[in-house]
Amino acid sequence: MKRADGNRQVCDTKRIVRGGRVIDPSQDLDRVLDVAIEDGKVAELGENLDAAGAEVTDAAGLVVTPGLIDIHVHLREPGFEYKETVASGVRSAAAGGFTAVACMANTLPVHDHRAVTELIMTEADRHPFARVYPIGAITRGLGGEDLAEIGDMVAAGAVAISDDGLPVSSAAMMRRALLYAQHYDVPVIQHAEDLDLTADGVMHEGEWSTRLGLPGIPALAEDVMVARDLLLSADTGGRYHVAHLSTGRSLAMVREAKRRGLSVTCEVSPHHLLLTDREVADSTFSTATKMKPPLRSSADVEALVEGLTDGTVDVIASDHAPHHPDEKDVQFSVAPFGILGLETTVSLCLDRLVRPGILDLAALVRLLSTGPARVLGLPGGSLEPGRPADLTLIDLEREVTVRSEDFHSRSCNTPFDGWQLTGAAVGTLLGGQPVTL
């Protein structure tokens, strides 16, 4: 039988996930093992575990990992349900191999008070395909002037604060947020962008923006904000996380801050690892290549990939940003920023990072599960006994073709439509219960 537990279903019966290659960076584990699950939690890992009285999930030939976690997702509800809802978003998450998502606060009304936290949690309870961890706003209405009701939101289930979509431009306000968030032991997540430097830019400022005659967004717009915030982090001791970091110089500053012992983490999105600003030209101004931060230079891409391999980058996060097709089917300069990511991230990373040998599989699992759990202080990210039995099953040889019309999302804005990839998530378990879409 099943019983409700938060925004998921928990299996009361015993289950054995049999014969998969278990990769768990939290335990430095990469072996063919069985995973025993009881009462929604991992009970035991071992070879040829007794399956008497248990339901069996055959994982032979598959990779079994702690449930993957995407800590940068826009579920759009409340207010923009025509783009995405909690229900469609968690279905997309499960289809893409994620057992948990953290959703940003740029909703309508803005998620800056407890009532919105509770609404999101209630919708997640109704659609238990993946766990949902709300991220509350730093400032009221994302206006940058007054702190939001951080304590109430955290008490209701928020796990971090961010004005993502907009930066916290005021140094005084960011300093106050870094200090105040420490009372609730949550990180401050910054959309690092100096809006004065961005101005009316629509793509990365460089050779290709000049060739195409489009106003550019300089890398400096990100770098200046990251530099300022790292000084504030050093001053306050607050937990600071850089969302969708995209430039080599910002990465170098984060690397140095970590070396100095600051409580600083960062994430990178797959599109910033795999595409450059030239894609705007090659796609003939496709608005699916318009996102913020914009696609950067090849030098930036090389630096970010190096950050994955040397451990500077803590998380790969999709920055799943759905937009209705009518919004994107316009002139490049006026289209909204953002692309989808929940249903493409795993296959893109397997095919373009693991398969060529840029990353080993354990490193990818760390970036998609163990790292995200650590950054937000979540209970997942590990298959240690006693942890929630959230698992992702991966087939390294599964051939997939990205087809946006088949997405579970309400939107279809992706630059990867038609890409042929090898490797995919083929199932998830949530609280020990297989997720069926």
Image (tube, rainbow, N blue to C red):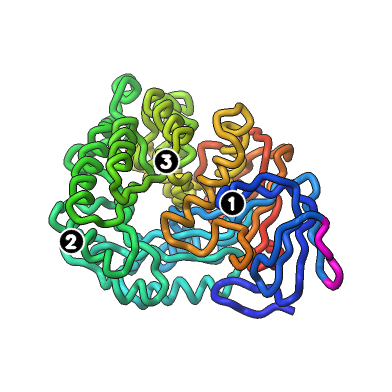
Three-letter amino acid code at the position of disc 1: Gln
At mark 1, the secondary structure is helix
Residue 130 in percent (x, y) is at 58, 63
Q: Residue at x 54, y 61 (%)?
A: 380
Up/down of 76 relative to 332, above or below? below
Q: Residue at x 77, y 52 (%)?
A: 59
Three-letter amino acid code at the position of disc 2: Arg
Residue position marked by numbered label 3 in the rendering: 313
Instruction: Please give left or right for residue 435 compared with residue 256 in the image.
Output: right
Residue position marked by numbered label 1 in the rendering: 27
- Earlier along the polypeptide chain: callout 2 or callout 3? 2
Residue position marked by numbered label 2 in the rendering: 176
What secondary structure predominates along the stretch shown in magenta? loop
| Magenta residue span | 48-53
Q: Quadrant of the N terminus?
A: bottom right
Residue 52 within the segment the image draws in magenta: yes
